[in-house]
Amino acid sequence: MDTLSDEFKQRLKKYYAGELSDQEAAKVEREIQQAEAYQDVMNETFEHDELPPGKVGEILKRSSRRARLTVIGYVVMILLMIYPVLMIGSYVYYGFIERANNLIDVSYSTVYITEPNASVDEFNIEYELGLFTFDVYMDLYKQVGNATIKQGEWVVPFRYNQPDFPERNYTIDQPPEEIPQPDQRLLYHPDAGLSNSQNGGWDTLENLPEGTVAEVYVSLERTVPVDELNRVINDIDAKWLWYAIDTGLDAEASGEDTGYLPPIGYPAQTGNNWSPYNFQAPNDEQFMESLKFLAEYEEQATMIARAKWLELDERIAFLEENGLNAYGGVVTGPAKELLKLRDNDDVRAIRTGEVRLWNW
Amino acid sequence: MELVKKKKGESRLSAAAFIISLISLAHLNIFLLTQESLNGFSFFYMLLPFISLILFIASFFQKGYSRTFGWWGVLIYAFIFVSIVVIFFSAFTIYPKP
């Protein structure tokens, strides 16, 4: 470009000095005409761009405002995308490899195993998925007589896959203690010492009027194979609702310094197909499967249960070696029928739970 | 001297398409924060994207304008679509009831 320009300058100088031939001079004149025409176009094009000095500031302001709005637009967009991106991560985290489903299973399986005579309405389990939090809402029920009554609602909050203490809201007259003291235990192993308050169960039952049904927590004098438990209540009009299983640790659990160890057991009744204790397999088999599943999530199960420890591996090993023997459980029936258990030599102590008007 | 083709700035139609997409994105945030049912689905995720798309297409008839915001608007709707699909698919796999 520079060479061409220099060469043109040289020719222009020669043109004005009259040193070019006619032909060369004519060529230079044509080029000058072309340059003038180009200059005219440039002048017309940029004529309006020459702004008065006052307008320059205004244009700068407008450009600055436009740039500011552009930045604001991008910042708003980025801010609005942060939460959805994190929530997608959260949904993928809980939806992936059935993590959320397992946490729900852990929640209600723990209830069935560690809460005597408690059941969960599996159809109405709800959940709320937040930013790497997962709250499980479940309604707990218990059977008194032939009626199923609502105990209350548990909310089990998980952060990632670690649970926090469940929020328990009960609507029944005698809600269980969060962490029961040894003398507030409902069921006692034959080798465990009885507390004084345990003797008051019969008095309560005796004072109940005719026309009432009750649930009673029955502790036996000795452990009995589960399939022989019905023999204990053969003579009365009542039925077992839940079996407390001897897992080898239940006797020492009465000591204060060991912390609360909840009784472990399973429902005597069979629920619907959606229940973990359904018609597809005997309840004792489903109980063992449930225990093994919970052993994989023992940390979570311990937090969900009203327990300081569960020691599931040790208990499973004991059950596999010794089979399923019960040391008590929950029985329901008419109050006066249940009172007949006082004369039963197999029964060591009882504790009265919920009472309702006749529904037997 | 180099001749430069001048642009007249961002197309207003394209900017409007972008702002509409931000409204839908804001609603997605509200839905995720409140965890309530997806009220106004047809308005925020069908009607507004449609209007935004029309504006974006219309912006192509404005010669000499930039359409950067319009493209961002399209990307935002693509993101919203992916988010809703992932969230609903994951929610569907969590504790499906018969």
Image: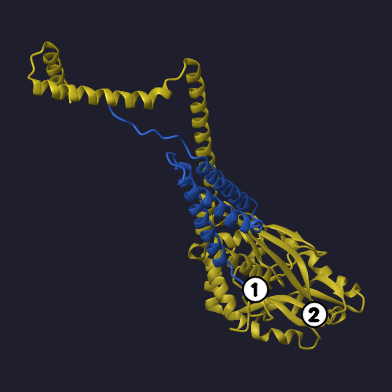
Chain colours: A yellow, B blue
Relative to A49, say whether B43 is above or below: below
The quadrant of the rendering that contains the N terminus of chain A is top left
Is A93 displayed left or right of A335 in the figure?
Answer: left
Name the mark on residue B7.
none
Q: Residue A160: percent from the left, percent from the top?
A: 54, 54
Q: CA distance from mark 2 to mark 1?
A: 21 Å
Crowding near pointer 1: few (<14 within 10 Å), some, many (20+)? Answer: many
Relative to A97, say whether A45 is above or below: above
> Callout 2: residue from which chain?
A
- Label 2 amino acid? Asn
Q: Residue A351: percent from the left, percent from the top?
A: 79, 70
Name the mark on residue A265.
1
| Residue at (82% x, 79% y) in the render | A342
Quadrant position of residue A170: bottom right
Disc 2 is placed on an element classified as loop
The quadrant of the rendering that contains the C terminus of chain A is bottom right
| Residue at (62% x, 53% y) in the render | B31
Is B38 displayed left or right of A90 in the figure?
Answer: right
> Callout 1: residue from which chain?
A
| Residue at (33% x, 27% y) in the render | A41
Is A137 displayed left or right of B64 in the figure?
Answer: right
Disc 1 is placed on an element classified as strand
Q: Which residue lies under the disc numbered 2?
A: A146
Residue A335 in view, yes or no: yes
